[in-house]
Image: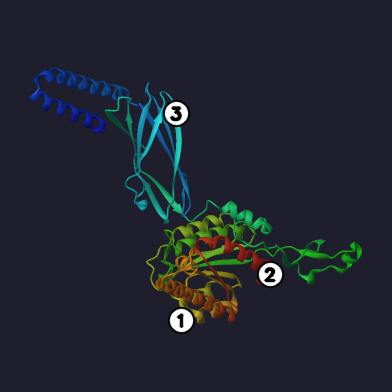
Amino acid sequence: MFRNLFLLPKIFVILTIVGIGYILAFFYPILLNGVHGASILFLAMVAVDIFLLFRATEGIEATRILPDKLSNGDENTISFHLKNNYPFTSHLEIIDELPIQFQIRDFQLFKKIQPKKSLSFSYPLYPKERGIYTFGKLNIYAQSPLGLVSKRYQFSNQQNLSCYPSFIHLKKYEMISLKSNQLMGNLKKQRKIGHSSEFEQIREYVTGDNIKNINWKATGKQNKLMVNQYQEEKSQRIYLFIDKGRSMKTPFDGLSLLDYSINAAMALSHIILKKQDRAGMVSFSKKVENMVVADHKNGQLKRIAEGLFNIKTNFSESDFNRLYIETQHKITQRSFILLFTNFETLDALKRQLPYLRGIAKKHLLLIVFFKNSLLQELKNPKENTHTALEVYDEIIAEKFDFEKKLIQQELLKYGIYSLYTLPHELNLELIHQYLEIKSRGSL
């Protein structure tokens, strides 16, 4: 009983007042009887408060409701259901023991619940790294209307949750791929035109259609331009190569570039499989690991999710030579390879360019690398720059951004596609790039 009994601040305030009363009674004895009476009343109130809270063994019932798994970088909802079995309104202080990854040590919620009533509520959590998250006990401190003491209830002993690459928005990205003429966010509209040899239908010409597909016979009959539409080519092999080396350690808004890439790989894999292409993945630094062979069988997205979840790294220097050799041996058929990495300088690219060119000879290669969002803010200040230091910062930011554009030009010179984007825009930009390359029939 006493292990779950806690004194509230109000009780110390009253004790202080009583103590002052006894001090005054020493100088003014006429006050002594009144102070004795107040002390007895105070002790009686404490006894009544303890009786009200402890007479019921289950005065409060509570359940913590967790999702099946957490989605990295997204808002995840943790829910509670409470029931008040006391015959009076209870004031509750709720302390949930959050996983150590959040580093939150002052988490508190305050609720009021009517007698014999139930209450449900939730709060959001934003995980920033993959792994196992351990929730501790749910502590609830119940108070009666007297508010002198509280009784602690503990529920939901240790619960473990796995935090997987971002999956909450997969349905949204699926809508983007299905309605490419109404893309969400900042994407440009992109028509979906198949380039395989399998004929689908004849339809009216729309601006942007390939003039090679004009059906002149149907045009003559209808007296307006008509085009042949072909089905999109399916079952193409798409591999997602994720660099887990030193260059991917940089954090933006709490997530590393590696985790941004992993989240984007998860989103794009979902779209690839919905388009009936074959999705696969590889991670690499000193060694090539976590390989999932490109396929579109049932359960492939789950296999990719497990592969992404299990990516572990110490952010050592990446070996592109090893990646090239493994690609030559293990990916024998022409594929579309999207390589997530980050080159900060043109010299850094040139050191790895022979291996990238080797991969691009056999496969269609797209290099994904990142804009520095902090440098973008310096480059495009919200207010006019005035001081010499602000002008200097802006010039340096322009220099780094220009270096990245030189990297794009160097890659293009050797027929290698590139995507240069902000980390938080990666998912949408990547899906748009995939749909665009697919619509061109480049594979």
Residue 335's x, y, as percent?
Answer: 60, 70
Quarter of the rendering occupied by the N terminus: top left
Relative to 268, does residue 102 appear above or below in the rendering?
A: above
Q: Looking at the image, which residue is at 32% across and 23% down? A: 56
Q: Helix, strand, or loop for circle 1?
A: helix
Quarter of the rendering occupied by the C terminus: bottom right
Say which mark, if any, is on residue 347.
1
The residue that label 3 is drawn on is 118
The answer to which of marks 2 and 1 sits earlier in the sequence is 1
Q: CA distance from mark 3 to mark 1?
A: 64 Å
Q: CA distance from mark 2 to mark 1?
A: 32 Å
The tally of labels here is 3
Q: Dot 2: few (<14), some (14–19), or many (≥20) neighbours within 10 Å?
A: some
Compared across the picture, whether 324 is left or right of 160 comes to right
Q: Which mark's residue is nearer the viewer, 2 or 1?
A: 1
Q: Residue 5, can we see it?
A: no
The answer to which of marks 3 and 1 sits earlier in the sequence is 3
Q: Quadrant of residue 289?
A: bottom left
Q: Residue 194, can we see it?
A: yes
Q: Helix, strand, or loop for circle 3?
A: strand
The answer to which of marks 3 and 2 sits earlier in the sequence is 3
Residue 207's x, y, as percent?
Answer: 76, 65
